Image (cartoon, rainbow, N blue to C red):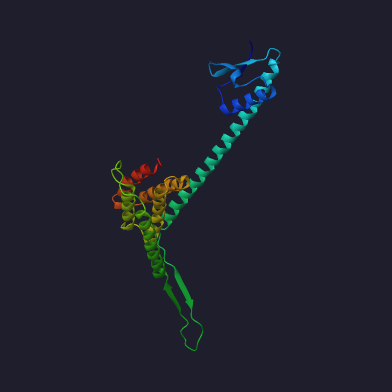
Amino acid sequence: METVQLLLRNGVNSEAFKSGFQKIMAENPEITYDSIQGIEKKGKDVVVTVEVPKDADKGKIEHQFNEAYEMKLEAVKQTALLEAAKEHKQEIKELTKDITEIAKLALSNQPNVNTIIENKPMTNSPDNSQNITSGRDVILTNSNANLREISGNINNLIQQLPDQNNDEKTSIKELISQLQKAIESEDNLKDVQKVEALEEVEILTKAANKPEDSKLKKEAKRSSNVLAGIAKNLPHATKLVEGCNELLPAIAQLLGLS
């Protein structure tokens, strides 16, 4: 029996091996997968023994296999590198978004009173003074409306969640509901900050309703980090800080974010 030994350095890549063996089968019809006589591990390398016809050019067969194997192996490596680069880019993008959200929330702690200066037109009256009116009432009105809207959206999403499962101490439905209430009742957050925090809770609730959605799961992980960042900017003894410390890890575990 004539044989050829194919040396695979540093182990076997299944895709590359399939490509290399298909190459020698195409060039040598007498060789099939049944021609493989043995596979032996030598240190980090692997030796595959293949039966070949008596008149076969063994050197050529080895060359055919090695050429196809190395070509496919390189392609697999490049694909893996591209996927890793893509994933790294996405992680950087999400981290940047987290930092932006936290910075935006920190800035919103500053007093925010808009003023409108109205120039009165010249008349026969000697009163050429300017009227200065505050836009704060308008801002607060909009914030209150937004707060009611986002809270309503979350309530609707929470109602769609299943009740407590037998294997859960506390259901995801109850945990998210507690987190929502902790934010809404937090005295150290302005309405505009509550709206921004509740927007992150809304994402967590959407992810809970669609646990199979990987994109939502990534968004939920980002939202969890943002909420943790909000809590860090508050006094330690507040209800929201205590709530985040207890609720966020539990929610993350049930959503499979950890």
Left or right for 35, reference 246: right
Work out whether residue 107 can be spotted: yes
Q: Is residue 22 left or right of residue 171?
A: right
Asked whether 101 or 184 is in front, the reply is: 184
Count of labels in the image: 0
In the orientation shown, which residue stands out farthest toward the bottom? 124
Q: Is residue 91 above or below residue 53?
A: below
Q: Position of residue 96 (x, y in %)?
A: 49, 48
In this rendered view, identify the residue nearer to me: 165 or 188.
Answer: 165
Q: Is residue 69 visible?
A: no
Measured from the top left, where is residue 46 in percent x and y?
Answer: 56, 18
Residue 14's quadrant in the figure? top right
Residue nearer the viewer, 168 or 119:
168
Residue 27 is situated, as x and y percent measured from the top left of the image, at 69, 23
Q: Residue furthest top?
A: 1
Which corner quadrant holds the N terminus? Answer: top right
- Where 238 sits versus 15, above or below? below
Residue 24 in the image, given as x and y percentages of width and height: 66, 23
- Residue drawn at x 44%, y 68% as measured from the top left: 114
